[in-house]
């Protein structure tokens, strides 16, 4: 996605909702309606810091019916590469940001007979927009929200006001845990389950679902991987005839972009597969960090997701 | 006139047990019983306890057909006089079934199609359903003009039981309607019909 396809927005409100999460409201610069979106969509926020540009994906948590603003929740990451710290420390009411158009990689199944939503921590955000669609009560649903402790339960007031008894909260600090086996053993046919949260939660739920006989087509999850930090390496772009240095705290995609070469992308979090790039030559190991390629595709070393994956190698040649 | 290679025409494969499922729901009509016995045999050898979580609904071909099923004592077996009675029971069973259920269907294509149509109402996806075609190839044909389904069609051209138009039976299949599409064959030149042949036996 090129820079001219971004939308300029202005920050109109910021609220610290938990010790780690800030809630931002963004409006179109100059007012007016923002592009329509559906529940589960995310945007990319482009942050122009002093020395580099961050582009992070955030789920839209506001109502798809209200397009005068977009709302996002940003968790301050301990091991931030700078994006979440920039949002927390540099962005103020009145700050201007650029965002990419919303993209939905986490929609609800349209013909499901029931939805079970499971959120861990900041993973609550896409469900806030989904709940707006489930509100009419045509399809039954239940929501299970797991947090470290009560003060970390972001947006709980908003959930309880609207959803009443359909939301169950579990606090690690109180020793409360979701009984995944009980939950997944007793759902009627045609139920779909959705998980958003830390990798451990997603693995537990998908593993339990499989052992309870759930087919993959009824299990949905989303987790944006932050590009992990790693050793520096060099990449040669065959078509551009350019050698690019990838420093430890910058992703392959970011380094290629900084060198002036555009790669199409949608999520920048290893989920959508849009930035899949052909590997022409590699002398060493590709470090795949995405959730998109199959094990067989990883083993073949024929392609890489530059948004989150790196390499430990002497030579890496990409078809760019 | 007849388009071949239409992608909507269903493709079936021999039934195999899916031991990833927790419950097994099996439907058979007529000769389809043989396919179910094969799957039950597979379950017995790979996951014997699964027989206790298996339910069979069948329209037996004759008075002997259900005997091998009755010998599996942990199996829950229900027999029906005709497809219509089976479908009513099938809907009730689906309504009480839990996620983790795998559906197996064996029998003539029209029987499979009607079972799939009901399964679709319950949002069962491809990875939860298996079907094997056994028995007659007679088609259920949906008249695109009057919307009546004509059953047990064995010929390439058939008179619609609803509006009496002569219909060409196409390979175009609708999962939602569980039928092949039938379109008026002599609309341009009334009364001029191609040769009528028995092709779906």
Image (cartoon, coloured by chain):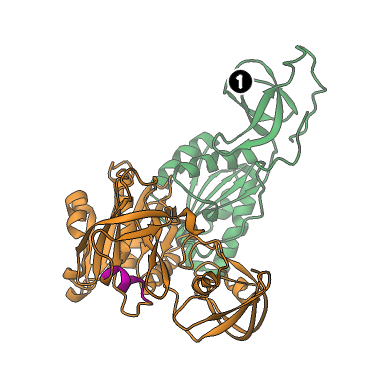
Please tell me whether residue A114 is drawn above or below residue A290 in the rendered image: above
Q: The green chain is which one?
A: B
Please tell me whether residue B154 is drawn above or below residue A17 in the rendered image: above
Please tell me whether residue B126 is drawn above or below residue B120 in the rendered image: below
Indicate the quadrant where residue A312 lies. bottom right
User: Could you tell me which quadrant the C terminus of chain B lies in?
Assistant: top right
The reply to whether residue B98 is visible in this rendering is no
Expressed as whole percent of the image width and height from the top left, the position of residue A218 reads 45, 56
Indicate the quadrant where residue A235 lies. bottom right
Residue situated in front as seen by the camera: A181 or B41:
A181
Q: Is residue A234 left or right of residue B199?
A: left
Expressed as whole percent of the image width and height from the top left, the position of residue A146 reads 26, 67
- In the rendered structure, does residue A85 fall within the stretch colored magenta? yes
The reply to whether residue A269 is visible in this rendering is yes
Expressed as whole percent of the image width and height from the top left, the position of residue B98 reads 39, 54
- Which residue is rendered at x = 60% and y = 18% of the image? B162
Q: Mark 1 points at which residue?
A: B145
- Which residue is rendered at x = 35% and y = 52% of the image? A115
User: Could you tell me which quadrant the N terminus of chain B lies in?
Assistant: top right
Residue situated in front as seen by the camera: B130 or B191:
B191
Q: How many marks?
A: 1
Q: Is residue B167 left or right of residue B49?
A: right
Tag 1, which chain? B
- Which residue is rendered at x = 17% and y = 69% of the image? A151
Expressed as whole percent of the image width and height from the top left, the position of residue A138 reads 32, 41
How would you rate the neighbour count of disc 1 (Cα within 10 Å): few for under 14, some for 14-19, many for 20 or more? some
Q: Which chain is orange?
A: A
Q: What element carries label 1?
A: loop
Single out the residue that lies furthest toward the right.
B195
Give the residues in magenta: A82-88
Single out the residue that lies furthest toward the top.
B190
Identify the main secondary structure in magenta: helix
């Amino acid at each position: 996605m090129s820079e001219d396809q971004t939308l300029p927005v202005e920050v109109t409100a910021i609220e610290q909702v938990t010790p780690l999460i800030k809630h931002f409201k963004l409006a179109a610069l100059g007012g007016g309606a923002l592009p329509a979106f559906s529940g589960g969509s995310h945007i990319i926020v482009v942050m122009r810091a002093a020395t580099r540009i961050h582009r992070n994906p955030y789920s839209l948590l506001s109502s798809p019916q209200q397009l005068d603003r977009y709302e996002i929740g940003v968790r301050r990451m301990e091991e931030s590469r700078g994006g979440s710290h920039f949002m927390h420390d540099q962005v103020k009411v009145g700050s201007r940001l650029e965002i990419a158009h919303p993209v939905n990689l986490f929609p609800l199944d349209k013909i499901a007979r029931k939805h079970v939503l499971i959120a861990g921590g900041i993973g609550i955000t896409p469900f806030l927009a989904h709940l707006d669609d489930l509100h009419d009560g045509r399809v039954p649903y239940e929501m299970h929200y797991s947090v470290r402790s009560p003060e970390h339960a972001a947006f709980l007031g908003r959930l309880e006001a609207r959803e009443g008894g359909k939301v169950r909260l579990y606090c690690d600090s109180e020793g409360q845990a979701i009984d995944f086996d009980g939950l997944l053993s007793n759902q009627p046919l045609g139920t779909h389950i959705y998980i958003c949260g830390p990798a451990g939660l997603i693995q537990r739920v998908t593993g339990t679902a499989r052992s309870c006989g759930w087919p993959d087509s009824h299990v949905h999850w989303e987790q944006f991987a932050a590009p992990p930090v790693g050793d520096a390496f060099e990449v040669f772009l065959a078509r551009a005839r350019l050698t690019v240095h990838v420093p430890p705290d910058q992703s392959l995609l970011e380094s290629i972009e900084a060198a002036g070469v555009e790669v199409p992308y949608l999520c920048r979090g290893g989920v959508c597969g849009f930035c899949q790039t052909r590997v022409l030559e590699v002398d060493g190991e590709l470090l795949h960090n995405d959730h998109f390629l199959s094990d067989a595709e990883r083993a073949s070393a024929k392609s890489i997701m530059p948004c989150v994956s790196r390499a430990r190698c002497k030579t890496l040649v990409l078809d760019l | 006139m007849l388009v071949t290679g239409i992608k909507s025409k269903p493709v079936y494969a021999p039934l195999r047990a899916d031991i990833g499922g927790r419950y097994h729901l099996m439907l058979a009509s007529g000769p389809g019983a043989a396919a179910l016995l094969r799957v039950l045999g597979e379950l017995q050898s790979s996951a014997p306890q699964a027989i206790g979580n298996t339910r069979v609904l069948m329209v037996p071909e004759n008075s002997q057909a259900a005997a091998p099923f009755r010998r599996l004592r942990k199996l829950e077996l229900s027999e029906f006089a005709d497809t219509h009675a089976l479908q009513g029971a099938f809907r009730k069973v689906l309504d009480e079934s839990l996620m983790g259920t795998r559906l197996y269907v064996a029998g003539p294509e029209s029987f499979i199609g009607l079972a799939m149509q009901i399964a679709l109402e319950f949002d069962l996806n491809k990875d939860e359903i298996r079907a094997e075609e056994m028995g007659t190839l007679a088609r259920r044909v949906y008249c695109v003009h009057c919307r009546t389904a004509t059953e047990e069609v064995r010929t390439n051209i058939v008179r619609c039981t609803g509006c009496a138009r002569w219909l060409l039976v196409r390979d175009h299949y609708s999962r939602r309607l569980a039928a092949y599409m039938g379109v008026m064959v002599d609309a341009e030149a009334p009364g001029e019909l191609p040769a009528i042949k028995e092709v779906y036996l």
